[in-house]
Amino acid sequence: MGLRPSLQGVARTAGVVAALSGLAGVLSMLGAFGPIYCRTERMASSDGTSAVSRTCGSGIDYLLGNGGGNAATFFAWAMVLLAVVVVGVGAVWTGRRRLLWGTALVGTVVSVIGLMSIGWYFVLPTACLLLAATALTGQARRARDDDRSASA
C-alpha cells in the first residue's frame, strides 16, 4: 500500500510553489536579477555627430527616484503579482475556496492579457493556485459525499 497524498496536502504544496515562484517573479520585476528593460536614445549634436545613450532599469528604480521609462509600470505589476500570491496562498492555507478561485481567475486574466509582456511572471504562480483550488474543491466534494453516505 503506497502513500496517497491528501488533497489538502496537494493544495498546500501547490500553494508553497505558488509563493516561491511568485516571489521570484516579484523580485525579477523589481530588478533583483538584473535590469528588466533597456532603452536606447540617439542624440544628434550641432557638429553632425551623434551620441547614443542606453539606460536600463527595473521596478525598484521607481522607489529610488530615478524611475524613468517603464519603472513605474514594472513596480505596479510587481505589486499586483505580490497581492495575487499573498491572497491566493492565504486562501489555500485557510481553506477559503471561493477567494482562491477568484484570485486564480485574476491571475489567469493577467497571464492571458499580458502574455507578450508581464503575463509570463504570473503563469506559474497562477497555475499552482488553480491546482490548489481544484484540490480544495475536490476535498470539499469528498467530504460532502462522505457526509451523504454516512447519513443514508
Image (cartoon, rainbow, N blue to C red):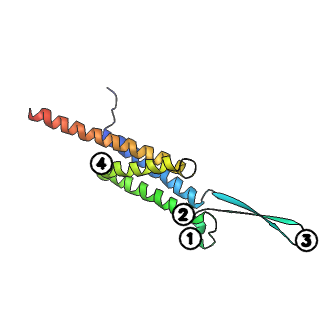
Q: Is residue 139 left or right of residue 119?
A: left
- What percent of the width, then of the height, locates residue 137? 29, 41
For residue 9, say whether it is visible: no
Q: Does label 2 or label 4 sit earlier along the sequence?
A: 2
The label number, if any, that marks residue 75 in the structure image? 2
The label number, if any, that marks residue 63 in the structure image? 1
Q: Does label 2 or label 1 sit earlier along the sequence?
A: 1
Type of the residue with mark 1: Leu
Type of the residue with mark 3: Asp
Q: Does label 4 or label 3 sit earlier along the sequence?
A: 3
Callout 2–callout 1 Cβ contact below 8 Å: yes
Residue at the far top in the pictured view: 1
3D distance between C-alphas at marks 3 and 1 = 38 Å
SS of the residue under disc 1: helix
Q: Does label 4 or label 1 sit earlier along the sequence?
A: 1
Quarter of the figure with the N terminus: top left
Type of the residue with mark 2: Phe
Q: Residue at x 30, y 48 (%)?
A: 97
